[in-house]
Image (cartoon, rainbow, N blue to C red):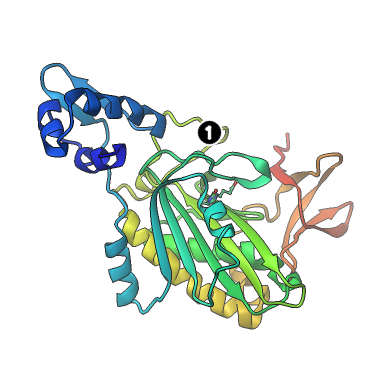
């Protein structure tokens, strides 16, 4: 027995006595208690009710590889799927497998990331069972320079999925923050390797907030899908839907590049027409958002001249 076996029993949110759990797993009640104590580290709150037992504060709908596979087969998707209880980072897991990678895509999902990676070296808060931590390793038969727009394309694919689920008021903040009512709903982190002239391998990492605990320590305004849709979102269906949308978008991107997505992207662009500050670390620029170029860089009008930015931290300036 390990703590993940215990979580599978407690996931229903019902009360389970220490004696029943100990009997079920053929271990002592002290062993059960020790595992319960360790759930805290995973971001799970487990209540202990005197003389009655243990109960998770919030029930969990866990990831189930066979359910995801069934949904993928029904929609004709063919990927290798890896579902983990715990990993440092799903992106790192797949990056380590690039050399063994066949032409078939691999998807890695985890219930919990100990070192979830965000953009610009930030940590991605990844409590157990709460959200979607998703990475897809995909091979593109195009050159590395053509890959620059991929993160924008992935943003569009995510928004298509969210809209198909009934989520409106969603947008994209360059390069790839997924927003709901201007609050962060998800993020995208892409790592590309390969020959300059192609082919390339991309690890496309997507974090989507589904049922983030209210006390999560996140340094910006955020939202989650359960709140946005006012329902309990099924993460298995969400994962299968994401794979299908990405496969469609990857096919179009490989053939036609970012140009095929630019119009859709500009309709979702929350920075367009806004007064912006672009922080490049050593230098700051101020100007007005003017959409994106065909290579995926952000276009900003500064003193009447439109300039491309391929990196930088962008914030909207409040004009007094
Ligand atoms: C961002 O900072 O906005 C990008 C966040 C990307 C997070 C996802 S979660 C799944 C995948 N694994 C990681 O370590 N990071 C990405």
| Left or right of residue 286, residue 252 in this image | left
Please tell me which residue lies in front, 294 or 243: 243
Q: Residues within 10 Å of mark 1 (few under 14, many from 20)?
A: few
Residue 165's spot in the image, x, y percent?
Answer: 36, 61
314 versus 83 height, above or below: above
| Left or right of residue 152, residue 22 in this image | left
Q: How many tags in the picture?
A: 1
Residue 15's spot in the image, x, y percent?
Answer: 14, 31
Q: For mark 1, what is the residue?
A: 218
Q: Quadrant of the N terminus?
A: top left
Query: Which quadrant of the structure image shows residue 143?
Result: bottom right
Query: Which quadrant of the structure image shows residue 204?
Result: bottom right
Residue 306 visible to the viewer = yes
| Left or right of residue 304, residue 90 in this image | left
Q: Residue furthest top?
A: 50
Q: Quadrant of the C terminus?
A: top right
Residue 259's spot in the image, x, y percent?
Answer: 67, 75
Residue 264's spot in the image, x, y percent?
Answer: 58, 69
Please tell me which residue lies in front, 296 or 138: 138
Residue 214 visible to the viewer = no
Seen at 36% across and 79% down, the residue is 76
Q: Is mark 1 within 8 Å of ligand 1?
A: no
82 versus 80 height, above or below: above
Label 1: which secondary element: loop
Seen at 35% across and 44% down, the residue is 129
């Amino acid at each position: 027995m390990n703590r993940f076996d215990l979580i599978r029993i407690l996931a229903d949110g019902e009360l389970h006595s220490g004696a029943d759990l100990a009997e079920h797993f053929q271990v002592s009640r002290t062993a059960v208690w020790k595992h319960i104590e360790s759930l805290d580290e995973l971001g799970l709150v487990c209540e202990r009710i005197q003389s009655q037992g243990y109960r998770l504060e919030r029930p969990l709908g866990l990831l189930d590889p066979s359910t995801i596979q069934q949904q993928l087969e029904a929609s004709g998707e063919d990927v290798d799927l890896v579902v983990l209880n715990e990993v440092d980072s799903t992106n790192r897991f797949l990056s380590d497998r690039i050399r063994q990678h066949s032409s078939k895509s691999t998807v890695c999902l985890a219930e919990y990331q100990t070192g979830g990676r965000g953009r610009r070296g930030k940590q991605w808060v990844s409590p157990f069972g709460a959200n979607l931590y998703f990475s897809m390793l995909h091979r593109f038969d195009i050159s590395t320079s053509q890959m620059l727009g991929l993160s924008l394309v992935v943003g569009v694919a995510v928004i298509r999925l969210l809209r198909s689920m009934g989520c409106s008021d969603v947008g994209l903040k360059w390069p790839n923050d997924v927003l709901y009512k201007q609050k962060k709903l998800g993020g995208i982190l892409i790592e590309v390797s390969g020959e300059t002239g192609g082919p390339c391998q991309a690890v496309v990492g997507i974090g989507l907030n589904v049922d983030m605990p209210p006390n999560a320590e996140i340094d910006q305004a955020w939202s989650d899908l359960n709140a946005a849709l006012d329902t309990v979102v099924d993460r298995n269906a969400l994962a299968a839907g994401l794979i299908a949308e990405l496969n469609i978008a990857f096919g179009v991107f490989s053939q036609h590049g970012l140009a095929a997505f630019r119009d859709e992207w500009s309709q979702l662009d929350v920075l367009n027409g806004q007064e912006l500050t672009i922080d490049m670390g050593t230098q700051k620029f101020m100007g007005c958002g003017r959409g994106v170029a065909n290579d995926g860089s952000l276009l900003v009008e500064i003193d009447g001249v439109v300039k491309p930015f391929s990196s930088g931290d962008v914030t909207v300036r409040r004009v007094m």
